Amino acid sequence: GASPALFAGETPRDLTVADAAALTRSALVSRVAPIMVGSAAASYGSRTREVPVIGSTADMLEVRHWKLAAGGFLPRGDWGRGATVCVIGEKIRSELFGAGPAVGQWLRIGDWRFRVIGVLASEGRSIGVDVQELVVIPVASAEALFNSQALFRVLVEARSREAMPRVTQWVLDTLRERHQGEEDVTVITQDAVLATFDRIFQALTMTLGGIAAISLGVAGILIMNVMLVAVSQRTAEIGLLKALGADRRQIILLFLVEAVLLSVLGAVVGMLAGAAGSWGIGRIYPALDVVAPGWAIGAAAAVAIITGLVFGIMPARRAAQLDPIRALAG
């Protein structure tokens, strides 16, 4: 297969396992997981495929909140001693081992042989890689496999949320001291990531809200135009109703009801289309919860009624202001 490829983090000075080990010395830090990321050819028997490889430690399991489908995770102990063991994702197990057992088997990765000691049950992505396609090995073994000591990232878990600011400063101070006074690393906290996502979602919400407002405006104008055409085509009918005793309020109510019915009909069609789309997405992606909540359906109906009332007022008033004699003559 192809030679192993290393993916290094973009820092002026490489992070090393020794840097990561130094971060464990604070009482405010509960876990530290150094990460080395690369890719290599993995083979078992006649089956071979390229796999993303992560070199880390036993703490990676708890830091990333992964679950195991079978076996165990990386052994605890000296980070500098690389055991030839690995943990694989479920998709790797299925593709390379088929229906047979994977735990206990030997998997060739690059020019090395690793004994499979566990299978990950978790789904999702970790550092941009599908967890089900991962192969995890001890960080010292990854250093030997990729012939490098450069880490991609170091994950640090604080003992509490309140300790996060002090842990962040501890990490910066420790690495600055180890890197001859250079602050050449970036600390990204979970709160900062969540805040970034919040800003993205707020921007998306505002964008979608703007699109919805424009759509409602267009729909309302269409309803108003339809009702104005209806008024012009039914002048004789309006004149007859007035001649028979219908007052201004009754004429307005008649056309407002028609406008509301038009908007509600459009809302029903939209809801049916949305339900069909949700059903289709649910069939394609069963893991996604695409059922619309009841309040959303109720809100859609309420907005449809309000739109019909607001944009139906002008045509209704125009109909009510028609002179019955001229209307009958027209």
Image (cartoon, rainbow, N blue to C red):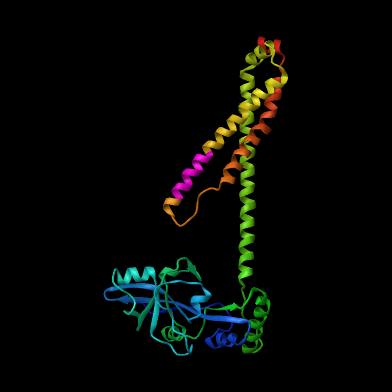
Question: Does 103 appear in magenta?
Answer: no
The percent position of residue 186, horizontal first and vertical second, equals 62, 77
The percent position of residue 277, horizontal first and vertical second, equals 47, 46
Tell me if residue 224 comes above or below residue 157 in the rendering: above
Position of the C terminus by quadrant? top right
* Number of numbered callouts drawn: 0
Report which quarter residue 327 is drawn in. top right
User: Magenta segment range?
Assistant: 270-281
Tell me if residue 145 comes above or below residue 330 in the rendering: below
* Residue 110 seen: no
4 left or right of 36 in image: left
317 left or right of 105 in image: right
Question: Does 272 appear in magenta?
Answer: yes
Write the residue at 62% across / 38% down.
302
* Residue 83 seen: yes
Report which quarter residue 153 is drawn in. bottom right
Tell me if residue 293 comes above or below residue 81 in the rendering: above
Position of the N terminus by quadrant? bottom left
14 left or right of 124 in image: right
Write the residue at 64% across / 65% down.
195
The percent position of residue 193, horizontal first and vertical second, equals 61, 68
What secondary structure is the stretch in magenta mostly built from? Answer: helix
